[in-house]
Image (cartoon, rainbow, N blue to C red):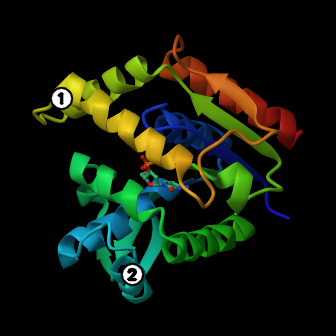
Amino acid sequence: MSFNVAVDGPAGAGKSTIARAAAKRLHLIYVDTGAMYRAMGLFVLQSGIDPEDTEAVAELCGRADISIRYQGGEQVVLLNGENVNDQLRTGEVSGVSSVISTVPQVRAKMVSLQKKLAAQCDCIMDGRDIGTCVLPDAQLKVYLTADSGVRAKRRFDELTQKGQDCSLEQIRKDMEERDYRDMHREISPLRQAPDAVLLDTSHMTPEEATERLTDLCREKMG
Ligand code: DC
């Protein structure tokens, strides 16, 4: 049986940074499930259909070929055979991926892919519904969160470092909207699993949070 760690939490809590770093230390595979929903969001944008048109999104999802590869330890998302990693982390894709992730056909397809992946390898998987839906039997579940102001500032710093022009107020507004949608959708909304450990990183450096997650994993790995 594979060793699986589920990390869930709202946008900008530091899930990917911390889960990726802990996975590296522990020689586990890191699976970023948000990137899969983002790839589907990108496909919707490329196709020009309305992200709110549930039927059109479901139909498009049936034609989407989304898969994951690992190159040099890094996750690569392929959309219809093309590496789309560099196109996934824009504000536009963030918003659209949150909207289309409410569509049942989209969730069913992604969850099935993620379950298969987790059955095949020892991994840390992050997302919104990993502990509650994708990996209910994960050996460790962590709910990673931080104050919304802190999360918005982190995302702002990340984007400005990349040279993107953005406003802190707008990022905060978009993030709060996305959190609300992710937490209130009908199918597998974001919430802390009853058996998840709460990790609030508001006053932690990424190193401290990584250390804590690594320790929690080690305790379970024995
Ligand atoms: O983790 P992220 O910000 O890259 O995720 C982008 C969007 O994808 C998020 O707003 C909601 C959706 N998502 C989801 O519904 N379930 C997951 N397991 C991961 C992401």
Q: Work out whether 173 lies above or below 20.
A: above
Mark 2, other Cα within 10 Å: few <14 / some 14–19 / many ≥20: few
- Residue named by callout 1: 160
Q: Quadrant of the N terminus?
A: bottom right
Q: Nearer the viewer, residue 39 or 221?
A: 39
Numbered circle sitting on residue 17: none
Q: Is residue 115 left or right of residue 160?
A: right
Where disc 2 sits, the SS reads: helix
At 26% across and 31% down in the image, what residue appears? Answer: 171
Residue 61 visible within the image: yes
Q: Quadrant of the C terminus?
A: top right
- Residue named by callout 2: 55
Q: Residue 71 location in percent, x, y?
A: 43, 63
Count of numbered tags: 2
Label 2 near label 1: C-beta < 8 Å?
no
Residue 72 visible within the image: no
Q: Nearer the viewer, residue 220 or 110?
A: 110
Nearer the observer: mark 1 or 2; the answer is 2
At 30% across and 67% down in the image, what residue appears? Answer: 51
Q: Residue 103 location in percent, x, y?
A: 48, 69
Mark 1, other Cα within 10 Å: few <14 / some 14–19 / many ≥20: few
Q: CA distance from mark 1 to mark 2?
A: 36 Å
Most extreme residue toward the right is: 222
Q: Residue 58 location in percent, x, y?
A: 42, 80
Q: Work out whether 85 lies above or below 155.
A: below
Q: Is mark 2 within 8 Å of ligand 1?
A: no
Q: Nearer the viewer, residue 62 or 186?
A: 186
Identity of the amino acid at label 2?
Glu
